[in-house]
Image (spheres, rainbow, N blue to C red):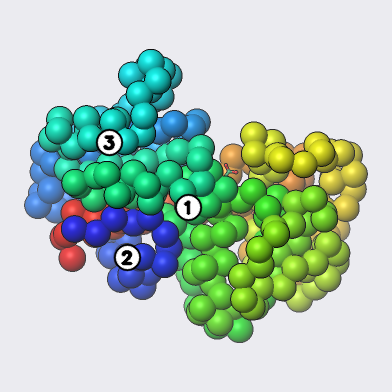
Amino acid sequence: MPSLVSIADCPVETIIERAEHWEKNLQNPDPALKDRTVCLLFYEPSTRTRVAFEHAAHKLKMRPIAIASDSSSIQKGESLKDTILTLCAEGMDLIVLRHYQAGAAAEAAGFSSVPLINAGDGGNEHPTQALLDLMTIRRHKGRIDGLKVAIVGDVRHSRVAKSNFLCLLPRGAHVMACAPESMLPDAVPEGLEITSSLAKALDGADVVMALRIQTERQDREAIDLAEYVQSYQISAQSLAWAKPDAILMHPGPMNRGVELTDEVADGPRSVIVEQVRNGLFIRIAATEYALGRY
Ligand code: NCD
């Protein structure tokens, strides 16, 4: 059965179709996975991703078992390998892993005898976030091909940005990553345009995606927040550079007043709450896919 480590492993359209099915049929659970176990192994804090996977498991009548790294043998120095081998021996059917190290998901999937879903590994990838983002964009724009998508903020450290590039670029979106020099990536995927000018990035954009500043992953001199706000904050004023029907996204958690203002976060163009809602349907669909249901 397949592990979902990278968005490149995902049958994107199939999973989104299944998620849309769940959106309409949330009250009609499919009992096929009843009593199967899913371990939520989180080495990093999370609200929406963890809750969505746990809620997804309940919707499928599965049994979720959540492990936080501060209350398990990880605290005693157990390696990722031994933790994964232990969980497999304990009879888990699926492991959902969030880890602070880039590459941890692929490494863990290599040790695991059961499928594994990457719920975010360091600055590497976050495939289910890219899936829910694509589902949300399609819902509003009806297409991906030819759309201008501006991704603004800490692109350098963002796994959300990376999975989105890998998902949006092959589908024909014109993706522009915008950040101050210190938050631009070293490696730029083919087709991605980068800029440090917010006006250039937002000009005529169909989709504006703000990213959180990943203070826990900074490897360069700390950014001056006031300077960042001045040049990169998404506000009513900067959002006016985008198309009048542009949507505003953010993977959360948001730092209101930094990456974006309250006014736009709660404004009519914001689809941030809808992203969270779609996250549940995507996690149900991804869980079923990893367990071979379709
Ligand atoms: C993101 C993450 O953890 O990668 N959040 C999420 O899963 N919705 C983004 C972030 O932490 O900034």
Mark 1: amino acid: His
Q: Which mark is residue 214?
A: none
Q: Does label 3 or label 2 sit earlier along the sequence?
A: 2
Q: How many labels sit on residues? A: 3
Quadrant position of the C terminus in the picture: bottom left
Q: Rounded to the nearest whole Å, what is the CA distance between mark 2 and mark 1?
A: 15 Å
236 left or right of 65?
Answer: right
Quadrant position of the N terminus in the picture: bottom left
- Residue 264 rendering spot, x and y as whole percentages: 72, 51
Mark 2: amino acid: Ile
Q: Secondary structure at mark 3?
A: helix
Q: Is residue 168 above or below residue 100?
A: below
Q: Rounded to the nearest whole Å, what is the CA distance between mark 3 and mark 2?
A: 26 Å
For marks 3 and 2, give the one nearer the viewer.
Answer: 3
Q: Residue at x 70, y 70 (%)?
A: 176
Q: Secondary structure at mark 2?
A: helix
Residue beneath label 3, please? 84
For marks 2 and 1, give the one nearer the viewer.
Answer: 1
- Residue 129 rendering spot, x and y as whole percentages: 47, 54
- Residue 92 rendering spot, x and y as whole percentages: 17, 37
Front residue of 140 and 72: 72
* Residue contact at pointers 2 and 1, CB within 8 angstroms: no
Residue beneath label 1, please? 126
Q: Is residue 88 above or below residue 158?
A: above
Q: Residue at x 61, y 51 (%)?
A: 158
For marks 3 and 1, give the one nearer the viewer.
Answer: 3
